[in-house]
Amino acid sequence: MDRTITLKIIVLALIAVSFGLFAVRFGRVVLRILQANAETPAAEFTFGRRCWIFFWEVLCQANVIQRRPLVGIAHALLLWGFLAFLLAEFDHFAGIFGISLIDKDSDTGVFYFWLVFLFAFCCTLAIATLAFRRHILKSEWLDPITTETSLTLALIFIVMLTLLPLWWISEPSRASQVIWWLHTIAVLVLLPLLPHAKNLHMLLSPIALFLQRPGFSQIPALQDAEDPGLATGLDITRLTALQAYSCVECGRCTEQCPAYNTGKELDPRLIALGLNYYMDEYGPRSESPILEVAISPKAVFECTTCGACETHCPAGIQHLSMIVGLRRGAVISGTWQDPNAAKLFQSLSEHGNAMGVSEAERDRFIAWQELPIFDGSQEYCLWLGCMGAFDPRGRAIIGSFVEIMQHLGTSYGVLSKEYCTGDPARRLGNDAITKELADINRRLLSHYGALKIVSICPHCVRTIAEDWNQLQPAEAGEVQAPLDATIEHHTEFLARHADRLPSRDTGPTVAFHDPCYLGRYRNVYNDPRYVLAQTATVVEPPRTRESSYCCGAGGGLVFLGDEGGNRRMNEERANELIATGADVIATACPFCSASFREAHKPNAGAGTPPFLDIAQIVAEQIRL
Ligand code: SF4
Ligand code: SF4
């Protein structure tokens, strides 16, 4: 092709316009992100770990493929194709100015051509698959496709389709000229479309994944007593802004959300997109309240903090820090007024437990159950928690677990005084009360020299193991009691002692419900199944393990009264578990047990399976 000076000038001008538009659009977003505050992480991933995450989650697209093989592979092929085409694109534009980056006749050039050819073929299939899903299957979780998204996909398609003939056809002809211009224009139109709306995820989600907070549901510590939580633009951190801009609007979070699926106003996608909208319309230096102008306050308090959204998000968006941050903003500013929450906070402050009952009730239970008092000489401090100390169902679980510990000859004791870990206050955005409770409990555990704690409640386990360490740093002069103890959940304890627990070849079928705070929060999936499998056949409900469906009690919601929406989460999940046809439904959280007990009442009848905690199932086997 004869590349005249005029041609070069035209192409150069088109490149300048395309890059200019790209830079203006992308620069605006980058500037908004950089104007936000830096975030002080509670803990840090090592650089090596971050590189591994980048390799595994971005380059290999492993999580996306594992969770949705077909769509995941289609998406991965697009990314790999995009990367494979980069060099060819640079070569194409350099060629206009007489520079050749690839010797097409060399072995390497030929190899590269076939590699690109392979990816072009796969990418074409991938785009067809994604288009079929969008236009024909019309998944209810996906937003209607916009003109801009359709145009982007069409342009990628044209770029891939035109590059190969360009490479192949060496003789100048009218056809090759048409293809050359088609390819060049497609690339130059595509470039400014990238930093816009959901296309931004192509540029930002790899960075968001690389920079994500370490661990699941990490809630950044408040900086000081004046920190208002996530209330206005001034409180949006760079990482939160980056994550909000990375949303690809795939709706995977929405699909998994128990609140959304039972007709509540909450849609986790709209939490990310709401912050995205706020950044665009108000910016990170705005003092306008985020709730109301960009996100519904009602929706924010409908979240059970089950974490399904965060687990399934392919773009590395950490919803829980956003949701709890927004709740903090509403609680600290006093804009959220809920009588049930006020009662809960008062109970926690005055009685040290979420039920609002006298401490003497706990003492009575300890005396009735003849539980030894922990004095530092026993191996385990058995943490009762509010449910274990006051709720009848929770007390029954404690009774069963104590039977097992006695069967194993494990020495244990319970604290003479113990207060709520602060879990419901923490999830509802009241760090002040959480910190008060954490400090008292830390002092008690430290005083008695507890080194090993075991609890029947995964909420207590999570809060003691992680949240207590992530609260606002101690004030100057304040001495925080050291906490040398490790804590584990009773299913982990049981799994470690499984060889000394009953084992039988025949037994009932048991469907196991993964509690959110045990599975997604602690990554404990196999231990309960391992224990159950010793005496039963374990069957799985349709939504299981990482995709388990919340019972509706978490996030402090169990204390807030009517959950709203058009269906109840506990009933929906209980019915799903019953529909497995299992003889027994097992779980491992006193909140799940209590929720299912509530849901179970209207359904109870002949043939309805019992809902039991694993400790109750194992204790029954010991009694046989
Ligand atoms: S944590 Fe659970 S309830 Fe809350 S938004 Fe995410 S999926 Fe929905
Ligand atoms: S937040 Fe994540 S899962 Fe939800 S729509 Fe956005 S990218 Fe998809």
Image: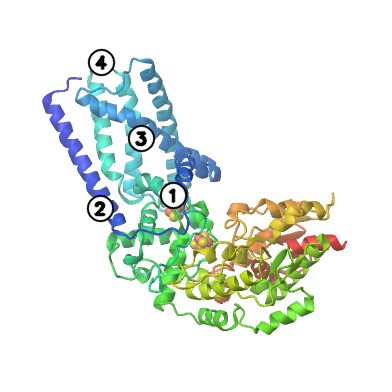
Label 2–label 1 contact, CB within 8 A: no
Mark 3 or mark 1: which is in front?
1
- Identify residue type, mark 4: Glu
Task: Return the x and y of residue 421 as percentages of the image width and height.
Answer: 59, 71
Q: Earlier in the sequence, mark 4 or mark 2?
A: 2
Q: Earlier in the sequence, mark 3 or mark 1?
A: 3
Residue marked by disc 1: 315
Say few, some or many: other residues with alpha carbon within 10 Å of mark 4 (under 14 / 14 to 19 / 20 or more): few
Mark 4 or mark 2: which is in front?
2
Foreground: 164 or 93? 93
**Residue beneath the point at 74% across and 57% down:** 494
Residue marked by disc 3: 157
Q: Is the C-beta of the residue carrying label 1 under 8 Å from the nearest atom of ligand 2?
A: yes
- Quadrant of the snapshot with the N terminus: top left
- Tell me the distance, in whole angstroms, between the alpha carbons under discs 4 and 2: 43 Å
- Identify residue type, mark 2: Arg
- Identify residue type, mark 1: Ala
